[in-house]
Image (spheres, rainbow, N blue to C red):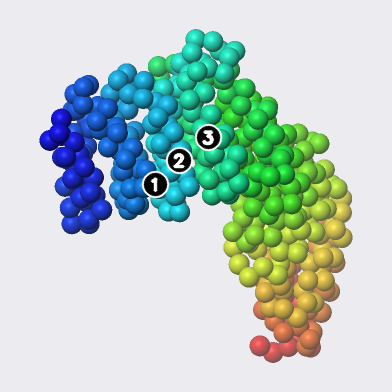
Amino acid sequence: MVELKQRIITSLSKLADRDTHQIALEDLHTLTQTISPDALPLLLNSLYDSLSESSNSKPSVKKESLHLLSLACQSHRDLTQPHLTKIISCIVKRLKDSDSSVRDACRDAIGVLSGLYLKGNGSGGDSNGPGPVVGLFVRPLFEAMGEQNKVVQSGAAICMEKMVECASVDRDNGGGNGPIGAFHKLCPRICKLLNGQFFQAKAALLGVVTSLSQLANIALKQQILLSLKLADHDTHEVALEKALFHYAIPAPHEVPVLLNSLYQSSSDCTIKPIIKRAYFLCHHGLKLPCSTKIISHVIKRLSDSDSSVWTACCDVYGVLSGIHLKDRVGLFVEPLSEAMRVPNKGVQLGAAMYMVRMVECAAADSVLLGEFQKLRPRISWLLNSGINCTASFIADGVALSTLSVLEACRFDKLHGPNASEN
């Protein structure tokens, strides 16, 4: 045993050296998978020591030690079950690590353990109770969420999300959807944290809400909608993403809530997928008042520096044109005409793109031909306007699309004798 302990300690120390890392890791993997039942506690204690705060281990050592803990459980599932409380506690304590890769390793380890010990039997035979095995996971995670440290709270939340996700995955088609009854018991406490004043990692906790909502249709969607009203910007962005992308078609009373949150979203990294979701909603027949607000919103995005945002908005504008243009032509045309007068090349070009798409998507309706004819004087004015710095370029695109739809005269006839020379 003394020699084995020395071998483990030596290999763990070699993980910190880039030159010896791979050899040491292979040795530890082999040892972990083949270790005898009598020597297993020795291995676990060595891994605990390498993860302790007093060890001063490098992040690479901590990450591999966490992985080895989960590997030991995979290789010796029944033998490690009596040690599960200490293993989980050791993992959760590393959530305070300053290195994000170590916290990610904690999340992955919790996921492995959840798949091993919770799936199918986490309720301890009682589907209505919290279950002793689930308690081994959630108690230390909730304790970590109670610490006034956003990093620790966030780490505990992503671990709990992973726990729910991996416990409900049926990898081998062998049945078992995880301890649904026990997970139901988590909901009130999670909702309390989400609505509490002192919990700082609400954005991360929304991942748990989503995972629970998807498991056996636990009704937590309203919690996500309520989170849209929170002042924290990160929480608002995540809640909006979860609400828009994890549910198929919102109920009618939910659409205004989602749209109001969409209008508040200002992050360029999230606006494109959100606009694409609005595009999806448009296909499912939004009422005109909601559509009016969407039009106003996508017009405002004309000032965006990212041309791909214009493209996403164009799709929305086109779909709405096909649905509502017959009833409210001015609703679509007037804001575009105003945008084309803004002395900003990007805004003008974006407005032109919108008008092109509007004409293309509504062209199949013969009732609109007369309305499209009314666009010609405006386009002519833009072509001949000296104050519009890119008038010719923008109006050319609009005119071509409009005339193509109308099967009108050649493009050069629209310019007239006073057209500007390019």
Give x and y (percent) for residue 180.
Answer: 56, 20
| Residue at x 63% of width, y 70% of height | 305
Mark closer to the chain start, 3 or 2: 2
Identify the element where label 1 is drawn: helix
Of 128 and 288, nearer the camera is: 128
Identify the element where label 2 is drawn: helix
Please name the residue that numbered disc 3 is placed on: 141
Q: CA distance from mark 2 to mark 1?
A: 9 Å
Q: Amino acid at mark 2?
A: Lys
Q: Nearer the viewer's eye, disc 3 or disc 2? A: 2
Q: CA distance from mark 3 to mark 2?
A: 10 Å
User: Does any portion of residue 187 appear in the rendered image?
Assistant: yes
Of 292 and 408, nearer the camera is: 292
Q: Bin the neighbour count of mark 1 within 10 Å (Cα to Cα): few under 14, some 14-19, many 20 and up.
A: few
Q: Amino acid at mark 1?
A: Glu
Please name the residue that numbered disc 2 is placed on: 93
Please name the residue that numbered disc 1 is placed on: 53
Asked whether the residues under the numbered discs 3 and 2 touch, taking CB atoms below 8 Å apart as contact, a structural biologist would say: no
Identify the element where label 3 is drawn: helix
Q: Amino acid at mark 3?
A: Leu
The C terminus, quarter of image: bottom right
User: Does any portion of residue 400 appear in the rendered image?
Assistant: no
Give x and y (percent) for residue 187.
Answer: 64, 28
Asked whether the residues under the numbered discs 1 and 3 touch, taking CB atoms below 8 Å apart as contact, a structural biologist would say: no
